[in-house]
Image (cartoon, rainbow, N blue to C red):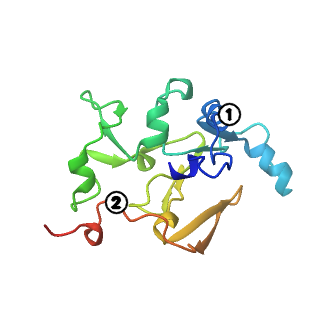
Amino acid sequence: EEANNNNNNNPPFVTDQDVEWLTNLPYTIRIPRTVLAVVSGEQANVDNDNDSFMVVHAGLVPNVALEDQSGDDMTTMRTIVHKVDGKEWSVPPPQKDKASSSSSLSSPKEHPWATVWSGPDHIIFGHDARRGLQLCPHATGLDTGAVYGKTLTGIVLPSRRLVQVPSVAVHAAIPNSKSNQTKG
């Protein structure tokens, strides 16, 4: 908020035009393996583009077409549960109690969404610093807590080589951590 105050006759940090531009961006970016092969000089199997990469902020619900994915899910999800029929997946509703719990990150019925994603695209995602680096067969979670003073992680495609550097500063306190809570 402070960055948007215009008390010193400075332009706001984020303008209304910036917000409009961001609002119109897609939730995902798909990078075909064939494109990466041309850039990297690799041989590509043009007939089989199933190992393409897709970048999304948080995640995708398995077995749901991209055009049917929820924008909220793609920007906020971490965990997934079986629907009542046990055949389809859904994102559980946010629960403050669960987020602040010091118990396991997942209950027996909940799963990190990336562990059940089966492709065809390999998904690159973030938004899950609590779990840290996630290396799953069809998804790679890169959120290693840089904003909390931990590590910034990147990925080099198509090789999936990881690159990590230490964070230069703590930009935010870890949510719901014992060190952030005051005794009353």
Please provide percent x and percent y for residue 111: 33, 48
Residue bearing the label numbered 2: 175
Q: Residues within 10 Å of mark 1 (few under 14, many from 20)?
A: few
- Residue at 21% x, 60% y is 103
Most foreground residue, 147 or 3: 3
Amino acid carrying mark 2 in the image: Pro
Horizontal side of residue 78 vs 38, given as left or right = left
Q: Residues within 10 Å of mark 2 (few under 14, many from 20)?
A: few
Residue sitting farthest toward the left: 184
Horizontal side of residue 175 vs 163, given as left or right = left
Task: Determine contact: label 1, label 2, CB under 8 Å.
Answer: no
Please provide percent x and percent y for residue 94: 30, 40
Residue bearing the label numbered 1: 17
Q: Quadrant of the C terminus?
A: bottom left
Please provide percent x and percent y for residue 33: 73, 45
Most foreground residue, 79 or 41: 79
Horizontal side of residue 147 vs 156, given as left or right = left
Q: Is residue 144 visible?
A: no
Residue sitting farthest toward the top: 68
Amino acid carrying mark 1 in the image: Gln
